[in-house]
């Protein structure tokens, strides 16, 4: 059986790969663009979110952690100290790698133009950073913000990561997202018109979503001018509303095998030119309630590879351009 997989990998039909992957990996894109290993350094610039400060809601999305999904940023108040600590850690793993400053926690465009300049421009000017990645929500992008990002994009590669999670109203309401698909789409088209590369975040195994629901979300993003996508499993964490709800009244979560099946089905309907930045996510071990199988990321990724070989499939196999 091992020999069978090796033979299949040698004749991998997928064109955006130089290894055994049958999907367009983030690592492949970065190596082709920059010629070597590139790492992201997560940062917490102490933004907030319109779903936390009362503008649109309070308490945040039910699954969001106290650090606004920025749990892996170094715990220093100063951004330069955070970056230096992150750089040191990345260079211990991958000596000499190039770096991306990744503003991950909360909604990183939710501020005045003056404040955004204060936060970002010191990193735009740094020669040791090749790109800036900015995680945010569609309702935190406007014309002035998009113009500012466009001006920075002339100096350094800018990526905007937009949280979508699901296209289904039932999930948006249940998760207390206070954010609509239209807001996501409006922001995406605005940024795209300015030449900004955008990535969408989606989450599998949101409560009461079926496999078909999750694939419908993938089919939707396949119609949009996105450069990349991140696919995550839902993490239930301590000190989150959803985590407490689960402990009080557990609901069904995808098993590893079910997750692999869903992800491969999603990859099949995505365009082959869409970069897959992530197929599984992280949660701090001391905070993760379930699913514990997500801890072993390498196994999850290997199972995805094996399932794609078993099906004799690849990213975009069933992609049909409809928009």
Image (cartoon, grey):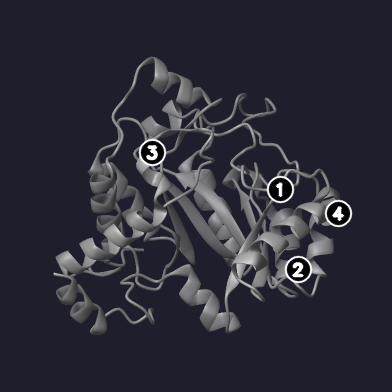
Q: CA distance from mark 3 to mark 1?
A: 24 Å
Q: Quadrant of residue 121?
A: bottom right
Q: Nearer the viewer, residue 4 or 33?
A: 4
Secondary structure of the residue carrying numbered label 1: loop
Secondary structure of the residue carrying numbered label 2: helix
Q: Position of residue 298 (x, y in %)?
A: 39, 58
Is residue 196 visible in the rendered image? The answer is: no
Q: Position of residue 249 (x, y in %)?
A: 35, 17
Q: Is residue 23 left or right of residue 156?
A: left
Secondary structure of the residue carrying numbered label 4: helix
Kindly report which numbered mark, 4 or 1, lies closer to the viewer in this rendering.
Answer: 1
Q: Earlier in the sequence, mark 3 or mark 2?
A: 2
Image quadrant where one finds the N terminus: bottom left
- Disc number at residue 151? 2
Q: Earlier in the sequence, mark 4 or mark 1?
A: 1
Q: Earlier in the sequence, mark 2 or mark 1?
A: 1
Residue at the image position 58 percent from the left and 29 percent from the top: 60
Residue at the image position 71 percent from the left and 63 percent from the top: 87
Q: Quadrant of residue 132?
A: bottom right
Image quadrant where one finds the C terminus: bottom left
Q: CA distance from mark 2 to mark 1?
A: 28 Å
Kindly report which numbered mark, 3 or 2, lies closer to the viewer in this rendering.
Answer: 3
Is residue 173 visible in the rendered image? The answer is: yes
In the rendered image of this protein, does residue 164 appear above or below residue 87? above
Q: Badge 3 is on which residue?
A: 292
Q: CA distance from mark 3 to mark 2?
A: 43 Å
- Disc number at residue 118? 4
**Mark 3 closeness class: few <14, some 14–19, many ≥20 residues within 10 Å:** some
Q: Is residue 283 left or right of residue 41?
A: left
Q: Badge 1 is on which residue?
A: 74
């Amino acid at each position: 059986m091992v020999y069978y997989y090796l033979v299949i990998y040698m004749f991998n039909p997928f064109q955006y790969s130089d290894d055994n992957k049958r999907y367009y990996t983030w690592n492949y894109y970065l190596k082709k663009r920059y010629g070597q290993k590139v790492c992201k350094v997560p940062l917490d610039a102490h933004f907030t979110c319109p779903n936390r400060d009362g503008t649109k809601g309070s308490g945040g999305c039910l699954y969001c952690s106290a650090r606004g999904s920025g749990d892996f940023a170094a715990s220093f108040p100063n951004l330069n100290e955070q970056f230096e600590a992150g750089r040191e850690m990345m260079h211990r793993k991958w000596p000499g790698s190039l770096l991306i400053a990744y503003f991950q926690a909360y909604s990183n465009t939710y501020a005045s133009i003056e404040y955004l300049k204060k936060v970002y421009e010191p990193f735009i000017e740094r020669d040791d950073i090749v790109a800036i990645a900015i995680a945010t929500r569609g309702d935190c992008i406007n014309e002035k913000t998009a113009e500012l990002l466009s001006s920075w994009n002339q100096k350094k590669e800018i990526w905007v990561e937009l949280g979508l999670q699901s296209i289904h109203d039932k999930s948006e309401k249940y998760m207390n997202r206070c954010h609509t698909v239209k807001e996501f789409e409006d922001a995406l088209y605005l940024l795209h018109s300015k030449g900004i590369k955008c990535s969408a975040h989606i989450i599998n195994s949101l409560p009461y979503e079926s496999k078909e629901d999750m694939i419908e979300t993938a089919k939707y993003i396949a119609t949009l001018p996105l450069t990349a996508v991140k696919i995550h499993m839902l993490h239930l964490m301590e000190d989150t509303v959803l985590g407490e709800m689960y402990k009080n009244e557990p609901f069904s979560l995808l098993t590893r095998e079910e997750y692999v099946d869903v992800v491969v089905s999603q990859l099949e309907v995505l365009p082959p030119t869409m970069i897959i930045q992530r197929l599984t996510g992280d949660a701090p071990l001391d905070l993760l309630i379930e699913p514990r199988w997500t801890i072993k990321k390498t196994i999850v990724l290997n199972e995805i590879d094996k399932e794609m070989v078993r099906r004799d499939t690849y990213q975009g196999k069933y992609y049909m351009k409809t928009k």
